[in-house]
């Protein structure tokens, strides 16, 4: 919920930087959050672990998955040079430039939320890569349900009809549209032009 309020903060500031930050955060946050969810879903499928406090040692057993989770966590926190930093920087600079008391309150909420996000995501990363004796060591399933770990050939664990159902069709003959790096700024300026 806090990330929706970041986007609303950027939109309500009615500045190019605010709208740029809001649009960037909408795109970046969706990628970072879904990456974290996919990583945790993969952990659940491979190990049967349902609670993150039981994920001790997974950084060594599932290094690719936990590396993806770590990158997503750093982006969600907003640590440079990850995407979350860029969007939060735009939002914070727009809020400070606005100079209104509520804009400062919004900037403070963004910073406080980043600290709370660091607390809950980096705890998982710490347990995964640096488990203590109390954290235990999570075993990867070998019962045929989750496979035996990471690496090539994992699709054999997914039934054929499911593998075919995972295919994603895109418009324009399956070709993805080229992403323009200035899109958020151009979109923000386009939204503001009718107001000027």
Image (cartoon, rainbow, N blue to C red):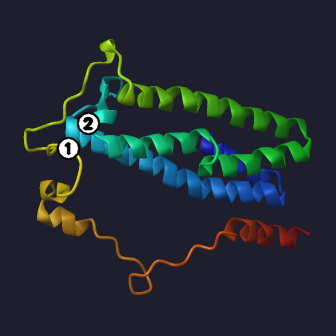
In the rendered structure, which disc, 2 or 1, sits on the residue that comes first in sequence? 2
Quarter-of-image position of residue 28? bottom right
Placement of 134 over or under 114, stated as above or below: above
Quarter-of-image position of residue 116? top right
> x, y percentage for residue 162?
18, 62
Would residue 9 be visible to someone looking at this image?
Answer: no
Quadrant location of the N terminus?
Answer: top right
> Spatial distance from mark 2 to mark 1, Cα to Cα?
7 Å
Q: Determine the residue located farthest toward the left in the rendered image.
A: 143
Residue at 40%, 77% (x, y): give it: 170
Q: Determine the residue located farthest toward the bottom in the rendered image.
A: 173
Provide the residue designation for mark 2: 61
Count the numbered circles shown: 2
Q: Secondary structure at mark 1?
A: loop
Answer yes or no: do the residues labelled 2 and 1 have beta carbons within 8 Å? yes
Residue at 8%, 44% (x, y): give it: 144
> x, y percentage for residue 103?
83, 40
- Near-viewer residue (191 or 144): 144
Residue at 82%, 47% (x, y): give it: 93
The numbered mark at residue 149 is 1
> x, y percentage for residue 35?
43, 50
Left or right: 62, with 22 as reference point:
left
Q: Residues within 10 Å of mark 2 (few under 14, many from 20)?
A: many
> x, y percentage for residue 114?
63, 34
- Near-viewer residue (50 or 131): 131
Quadrant location of the C terminus?
Answer: bottom right
């Amino acid at each position: 919920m806090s990330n929706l309020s970041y986007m609303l903060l950027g939109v309500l500031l009615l500045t190019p930087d605010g709208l740029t930050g809001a649009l960037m955060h909408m795109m970046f946050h969706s990628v970072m959050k879904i990456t974290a969810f996919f990583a945790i879903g993969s952990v659940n499928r491979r190990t049967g672990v349902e609670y993150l406090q039981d994920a001790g040692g997974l950084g060594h057993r599932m290094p690719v998955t936990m590396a993806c989770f770590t990158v997503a966590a750093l982006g969600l926190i907003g640590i440079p040079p990850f995407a979350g930093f860029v969007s939060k920087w735009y939002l914070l600079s727009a809020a400070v430039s606005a100079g209104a008391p509520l804009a400062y309150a919004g900037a403070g909420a963004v910073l406080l939320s980043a600290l709370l996000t660091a607390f809950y995501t980096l705890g998982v990363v710490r347990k995964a890569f640096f488990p203590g004796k109390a954290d235990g060591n999570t075993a990867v399933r070998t019962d045929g349900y989750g496979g035996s770990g990471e690496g090539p050939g994992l699709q054999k664990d997914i039934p054929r009809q499911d593998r075919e159902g995972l295919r994603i069709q895109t418009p324009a003959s399956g070709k993805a549209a080229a992403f323009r790096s200035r899109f958020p700024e151009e979109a923000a300026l386009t939204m503001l032009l009718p107001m000027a």
